[in-house]
Amino acid sequence: EGIVSAYASDAEHDAEVSVRPKRLADFIAQHRVRDQLDLLLRGAMGRGTPPDHILLSGPPGLGKTTLANIVAAELGVGIRVTSGPAIERSGDLAAIVTSLVEGDVLFIDEIHRIAKPAEELLYSAMEDFRVDVVVGKGPGATAIPLDVEPFTLVGATTRSGLLTGPMRDRFGFVAHLDFYSADDLRTLLHRSARILGVPITEEGAVEIAGRSRGTPRIANRLLRRVRDFAEVRADGVVNLETARAALQVYDVDGLGLDRLDRAVLTALVESFRGGPVGLSTLAVAVGEQPDTVEEVCEPFLVRAGLLARTPRGRVATEAAWRHLGISPPNGTFG
Ligand code: ADP
């Protein structure tokens, strides 16, 4: 699983951090988002106030955490990092926001998973820069108002549709990150290889880019796996030959689909004759949470034209059958 899901080790994590762009100018592609952010940050710096709160949405590995760090770096302020699931009680959030220094960036990953009472506290922190902390229970409970220094919230979510309306409304700037083109990932791979000191040919970069699921994190990870292969079994150069051989060893197919992607497609085609089938049924068939299938796996399958979401359920496209090398039943397509 390691190759596309969690970090295999601390060293992997360090390697990822070392290639992470530090400034907006080094952030590859996503030109529209970059341009908009540039204006937002410069405008705020010119006025000497923190910029509006920023919401970043998009599938995992596309650069949301990277952008949050870049925002803080460009503003020259500190950053506090937490995540929705880590904030269980409103007290957790109160402790964080009241400890912020003026101008700080507060990054909340998976912000749609924040617990309801904490979410309500966050509203007033975002809007009025104050929070009411309730002390005690029952009739004797008192609300103690506390001031919060002006800060910028950067929220990240895999789908902005998962956010409540009041939450979304409190972000002055909302950006959606989309999958990267193979060409952008090729550029990214050359940059990462340079930083890591890995010799790479143009063909090697093209090969890895085309099999990275449109995702920078995966491109960087595949680069490290191909480097391993090239160093152990060849002359250390990442080229077409070492890329192909290594990706074969790591079970990355021609489209870059990982094991879960393939499991979903295979179940759809073999167990449900191509669908339509409901999300939860499909998730059970592959032994995953519906959220994971929907937020992590499906966006790329849809983008790659392999899966369609219809009102009646998920459907495999003709390309999906072809990719798996299975003939669809007569009359399924056309
Ligand atoms: P997310 O928070 O959306 O899951 P990250 O910000 O952690 O994604 O990005 C994963 C990795 O991909 C980062 O460590 C960084 O090295 C790389 N990366 C993401 N976006 C870009 C980009 N636009 N340019 C260069 N590298 C990127």
Image (cartoon, rainbow, N blue to C red):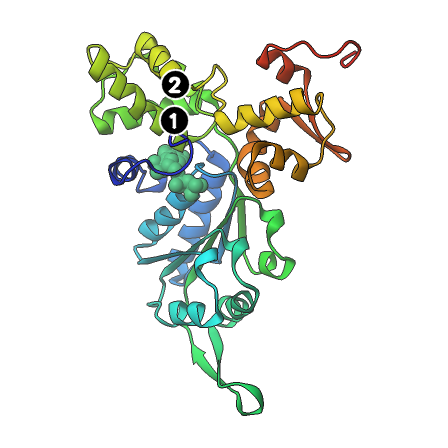
- What label sits on residue 208 in the rendered view? 2
**Along the horizontal axis of the image, is 115 left or right of 13?**
right
**Along the horizontal axis of the image, is 13 left or right of 49?**
left
Q: Secondary structure at mark 1?
A: helix
Q: Please tell me which residue is depicted at 33% across the width and 15% down the height of the picture.
A: 246
Q: Quick one: 318 or 149, which is closer to the camera?
A: 318
What number of labels is visible?
A: 2
- What label sits on residue 219 in the rendered view? 1
Q: CA distance from mark 2 to mark 1?
A: 7 Å
Say few, some or many: other residues with alpha carbon within 10 Å of mark 2 (under 14 / 14 to 19 / 20 or more). Answer: many
Q: Where is the N terminus found, in terms of image quarters?
A: top left
Q: Secondary structure at mark 2?
A: helix
Q: Position of residue 250 (x, y in %)?
A: 38, 20
Question: 144 above or below 17?
Answer: below
Residue type at numbered disc 2: Ile
**Along the horizontal axis of the image, is 24 left or right of 310?**
left
Q: Closer to the N terminus: mark 2 or mark 1?
A: 2
- What label sits on residue 31 in the rendered view? none
Q: Position of residue 232 (x, y in %)?
A: 21, 16
Q: Please tell me which residue is depicted at 62% across the width and 62% down the height of the picture.
A: 166
- Mark 2 and 1 residues: CB-CB less than 8 Å, in contact? yes
| Residue 28 makes an appearance in the image | no
Callout 2: CB less than 8 Å from ligand 1? no
Q: Where is the C terminus found, in terms of image quarters?
A: top right
Q: Please tell me which residue is depicted at 57% across the width and 32% down the height of the picture.
A: 286
Q: Position of residue 192 (x, y in %)?
A: 29, 28
Residue type at numbered disc 1: Ala
| Residue 329 makes an appearance in the image | yes
